[in-house]
Image (cartoon, grey):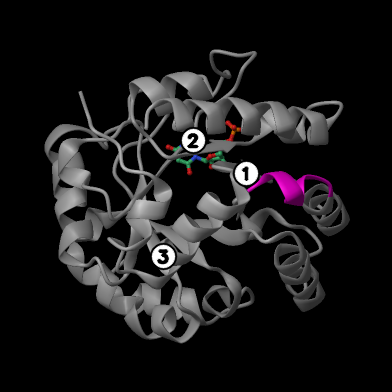
Amino acid sequence: KLVHKSFGERVTLATNPAAVKLFKLMESKKTNLAVAVDLVNKSEILALAEAIGSEICCLKTHVDIVQDFDQDFITQLQSIAAKHNFIIFEDRKFADIGNTVKYQYENGVYNISKWADAVTVHGVAGPAIIDGFRDGLKQKGAGLLILAQMSSKGSLCVGEYTNQMIEMGKQNADAVLGFICQEKLEAMGDNFVLMTPGIQFNSKGDNMGQQYNTPDYVIKEKGTDVIIVGRGIYQSNDPKSEAIKYRQQSWSAYESRL
Ligand code: BMP
């Protein structure tokens, strides 16, 4: 059985500045709910962010699906994040060599390094990918989330690959905020934030490989820290009250394991 420290205690163990910020934020705001806002219109995304902002610790974007993306979208999203006190993480899943991801992170239409507090990375190309992020991360005080496991059926991020991803995080704890995973493995330690997608109350999965668990199960039984909920919230008739339900279950699951 894993022994769990509180987010407050883990503030002092974290070395990445975004991890420190997120542990503090979760402890003070009393929420470990992240929402994946996979909507394709700027106005819909901003309206949802405003509606659920008070309930969440993180808002996860896929910025490359936004049809009417512009700089104003980022400006407005950042002001909603500041008003409601949550961080923004861009789920870009960078996976190329260090030199290329540096361009992808700092340039192009989206300029991700200028606004994202965290970004996701596949370590398949090896640990030097992290060197491509160091300059950009430092300027913003941001962090990387390494994909250690995935929620989808037949995922190849398992076993020895997962172990290697944990090792990559530990060797680069200055740059790494945490892991995207389905469970806490002992090697992950207490200085990283563990985030788990594939969460929904009313579904076991979709017809494209997604698999769902409940907040209670992944936090209490699997030892993760933050749940990432997408369709369970943004497709509901009343996203705000649904977000409150996910928030309550995930926070009480967290409190019960302390
Ligand atoms: P939903 O709850 O609607 O299934 O959305 C899950 C979100 O989490 C999506 O944005 C997806 O890209 C992301 N995600 C995932 O589902 N599984 C993973 O292992 C990693 C992810 O980033």
Q: Are marks 2 and 3 in contact (CB under 8 Å)?
A: no
Label 2 beta carbon less than 8 Å to ligand 1: yes
Residue indicated by mark 1: 36
Q: Secondary structure at mark 3?
A: helix
Residue located beneath label 3 in the image: 20
Give the prevailing secondary structure in the magenta stretch.
helix
Dot 2 or dot 1: first in sequence order is: 1
Sort mark 2 into few (<14), some (14-19) or many (20+) by Cα contacts within 10 Å: many
Left or right: 66 in relation to 221: right
- Choose top left, top right, bottom left or bottom right for residue 120: bottom left
* Circles 2, 1 touching at the beta carbon (< 8 Å): yes
Q: CA distance from mark 2 to mark 3?
A: 21 Å
The relative height of residue 111 versus residue 224 in the rendered view (above or below) is below
Direction from residue 94 to residue 42 in the image, left or right:
right
Tag 1: amino acid: Ala
Q: Is residue 165 visible?
A: yes
The reply to whether the magenta stretch includes residue 35 is no
- Identify the amino acid type marked 2: Pro
Q: How crowded is the residue under tag 1: few (<14 C-alpha within 10 Å), some, or many (20+)?
A: many
Residue indicated by mark 2: 197
Which residue shows up at 79% across the image and 26% down it?
236
Q: Which residues are magenta?
A: 51-56
User: Label 1's element?
Assistant: strand
Quarter of the rendering containing residue 71: bottom right
